[in-house]
Amino acid sequence: MTETTLPPPGDRNETIEILKTVAVALLIALFLRVLLFQPFTIPSASEEPNLYEGDYVIVTKFDYGWSRHSIPFSPPLFEGRILSKAPERGDIIVFKLPRDGRTDYIKRLIGVPGDRVQMRQGLLYLNGQPVERRQTELVTETGGSGLMRPVARVEETLPGGRRYMTNDFGADGDLDDTPEVIVPPGHYFFIGDNRDNSADSRLPTEIGVGLVPEENLVGKARLVLLSWSPGASLFKPWTWVLNLRPSRFGKVLH
């Protein structure tokens, strides 16, 4: 007959205490992630020249209140937003893609409810007026085709004085001329800063972003904490150092 040997009571108590400590730590981490902060990795070039692929950004969750999308996996626990606060034009915001409610996107907010938004020959029009813009320099970067092309760095100034930089590869892009869209109540219009390399609200929901419901907002991107250039991989330890971009560490987003 086989006897079962139980661990001494002291060992059992120590194991229980360790499990309690781990559970408390996980709950605190979940609390912070849901209510306060969440990290995101930038997967594409759609927000260049302000965010680059491989940037590791910190997003604050309390700026616009909380919805079910503030919680991991967006469980259908409630509808709408708790302590809702309206975002401002120019904010860089993480939101859930409307067509699936799961995929995280990050773009700049351009149109708030009631705004009329349109692109004409590569120029952004807001409520019938062109947004103030000023070209600052001409550089060479990779365009949407993957080829190196000259790109103009253009500073835009929204009504109210919010300023930010954009990439402009010219006025012949697929989304440089669009119909005027009136942003309905409870929705927002987003455009990527890399104007000719961004699938955003200029495209309908079925193939792009479309208009984003208020409930889908996750949080406001505040700063670049860390950054690695493309090619860095968890499974290639040498790239953890070789692909670092220290010049982007701590960059505050505008």
Image: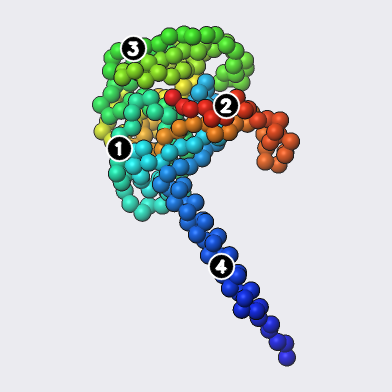
- The kind of residue tagged 2 is Arg
Instruction: Say left or right for 217 vs 129.
Output: right
Tell me which numbered mark, 4 or 1, is placed earlier along the sequence.
4
For image coordinates 61% across by 21% down, the residue present is 146
Which residue is tagged 3? 130
Instruction: Say left or right for 113 vs 149.
Output: left
Q: Nearer the viewer, residue 121 or 194?
A: 194
- The kind of residue tagged 4 is Glu
Residue 97 visible in image: no
SS at circle 4 = helix
SS at circle 2 = helix
Q: Mark 4 near mark 2, Cβ–Cβ under 8 Å? A: no
Q: Residue furthest bottom?
A: 1
Local crowd size for mark 4, using a 10 Å CA cut-off: few (<14), some (14–19), many (≥20): few
- The image shows residue 61 at horizontal and vertical percentages of 41, 41
Instruction: Say left or right for 189 vs 168.
Output: left
Quarter of the figure with residue 227: top right
Give the label, 1 or 3, closer to the camera.
1
Local crowd size for mark 1, using a 10 Å CA cut-off: few (<14), some (14–19), many (≥20): few
Which residue is tagged 1? 85
For image coordinates 36% across by 11% down, the residue present is 132
Local crowd size for mark 3, using a 10 Å CA cut-off: few (<14), some (14–19), many (≥20): some
Q: Which mark is residue 17?
A: 4
Q: Nearer the viewer, residue 11 or 227?
A: 11
Tell me which numbered mark, 3 or 4, is placed earlier along the sequence.
4
Which residue is tagged 2? 248
SS at circle 3 = strand
Q: CA distance from mark 1 to mark 2?
A: 30 Å
